[in-house]
Amino acid sequence: ASKAGALKLTPFPNGPVQIEGPLTLKNVKGEVIYQGEKCFLCRCGASQAKPMCDGSHAKAAFTT
């Protein structure tokens, strides 16, 4: 069973959004791809590890 609770979202300027709190991410098939308390999600679209950030925003010169 997963924990329930509030999530804290922190968008970083020109970078990812950090999510803190009890979190489970599933793909379109319903498979769990991440479960934990903290992750960074891609906002630039250049990450090779989507939906997670892999730092590609810097090379892509992503701006918010």
Image (cartoon, rainbow, N blue to C red):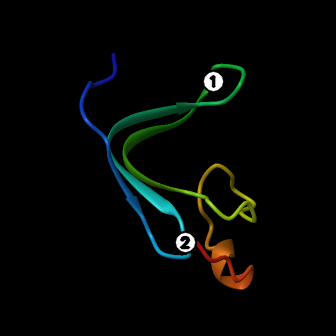
Kind of residue indicated by mark 2: Gly
**Residue 31, numbered label:** 1
Residue closest to the eye, 50 or 63: 63
In the figure, 13 relative to 11: above or below? below
Q: Position of residue 40 (x, y in %)?
A: 48, 58
Quadrant housing the C terminus: bottom right
Q: Position of residue 52 (x, y in %)?
A: 59, 54
- Determine crowd level at label 1: few under 14, some 14-19, many 20+ residues with C-alpha closer than 10 A: few
**In which quarter of the view is residue 57 placed?**
bottom right
Q: Secondary structure at mark 1?
A: loop
Query: Seen from this angle, which residue lies furthest left?
Result: 5
Say which label, 2 or 1, has the lower sequence index.
2
**In which quarter of the view is residue 10 placed?**
bottom left
**Residue 15, numbered label:** 2
Name the residue at 62% across, 77% down. Answer: 63
Q: How many marks?
A: 2
